Image (cartoon, grey):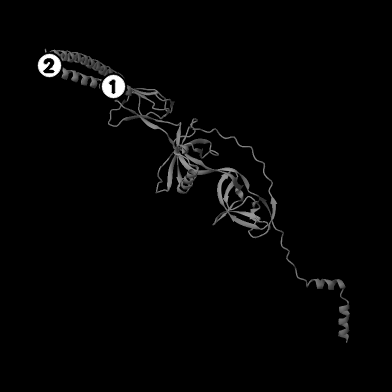
Amino acid sequence: MIMSGYVHVRRAAIPVGMLLALAACGESNTYVPPPPPQVTVATPEKRTVTLYLDSTGNTAAVNTTNLVARVPGFLTSINYQDGDLVKKDTLLFTIEPQPYELKYKQAQAAEAAAAATVKQTQADYERQVDLQSRGTASKATLDTSTANRDTALANYAQAQVNTELAKMNYGYTSVTAPFDGIVTARQVSLGEYVGANSQPTVLATIVQHSPIYVNFSVNERDLLRIREEIRKRGLTTEDLKKVPVEVGLQTEQGYPHRGTLDYASPTVDPSTGTLSARAILENQSRVLLPGLFVRVRVPTETRPDALLVPDVALGSDQSGRYVYVVNKDNVVEQRNVEIGPLEGTMRVINSGITADDRVIVAGLLRAIPGQKVVPQTAQPAAQPAPAAQPAADKK
């Protein structure tokens, strides 16, 4: 009884607040999920773009020629400084002209003598013909006169050839520039005897820089696409030579040098699966030197309603390139896309999205396919003023 009374007293002494606290300890905690992440979206930009065939190539001189001694003799003058830019027919070297001048005069004299002999034998022939007609000269005499006349004519023809050869050799003593170009360092010295060996003596080399060739290759896939475009547009061979070609050096921005397509090989190289092509550029400023490695692009198509998205919006995995798109339920979807060329900071999308799709352009790390997001529309950026194009070489 005493123990029972004691227990009763202790239960009555528990405060009401403690009872409420003890009751609260029995309730379970509920997980509250975080709100969907915020991302920035934008619809693809639609504008006219030009699609290009991109390649790499090398520059090559249109003309490069070794200047050689075509006649033997002592080198009497060198009339340029190494590396000079010279015009066509500029005198560069002189090879002892006096002996060849004398031989030329000698040949002229022999030609004059042969001409006099022809005149004499012709007169004798005509006289014998007249006498033969009167019956006062024998036929044998006429035959002799005819033979003498024909021999004199042949000797005169030979003398004319000898004069022409002597004149040519005399002209070879002056080595001139065959075209406008830059002459390399001379390979001979003043007073040196040149042209005596069986192989011509190389005096120097002249290289033409303007215009200049750019050689490049087109792979088989691009070639088939271009041929189909040519067929659709009905272009002729002459039309193809008017196709513009843009070229840029490795240290240059963009493609400041411009020319036209000049040649395309009629066959595909089976070992590489490529077709060789060549462009020609005026290169008046001579910025392009033969042998340089260059970037090349050729416009192949103008697309009036191309779709572009910021290049930073693109991702890649084993299946290729993709973008994240927010659907009408604000759920992220991954869309595989086929990309085109880069236009500044924007990338052309050939297929995979539509003009109404909301593409995630910022907050990509917070976007997970299949989960909801809170999309915020990106503010359109102000269009920058077009940059001044560097001076272009035009064909």
Disc 2 crowd, CA 10 A, few/some/many (<14, 14-19, 20+): some
The label number, if any, that marks residue 53 in the structure image: none
Tell whether 107 sits left or right of 227. Answer: left
Q: Position of residue 240 (x, y in %)?
A: 47, 39
Label 2 vs label 1: CA separation?
Answer: 35 Å
> To which residue does mark 1 refer?
164
Residue name at image x 16 percent, y 18 percent: 146
Quarter assignment of residue 84: top left
Residue 273 locus on image (x, y percent): 42, 48
Residue 120 vs residue 97, the one in the foreground: 120
Q: Residue furthest front?
A: 134
Position of residue 293 measured from the top left corner of the image (x, y, whole percent) = 47, 40
Q: Is 62 on the left or on the right of 105, as rendered?
A: right
Identify the mark at residue 141; answer none if there is no mark: 2
Task: Name the residue type under label 2.
Answer: Thr
Quadrant in the picture for residue 82: top left
Q: Where residue 347 sits in the image (x, y, percent)? A: 58, 47
Query: Which residue is painted at 86% across and 78% down in the image?
Result: 11
Q: Secondary structure at mark 2?
A: helix
Amino acid type of the residue tagged 1 in the rendering: Glu
As displayed, is residue 311 above or below residue 90?
below
Badge nearest the viewer, 2 or 1? 2
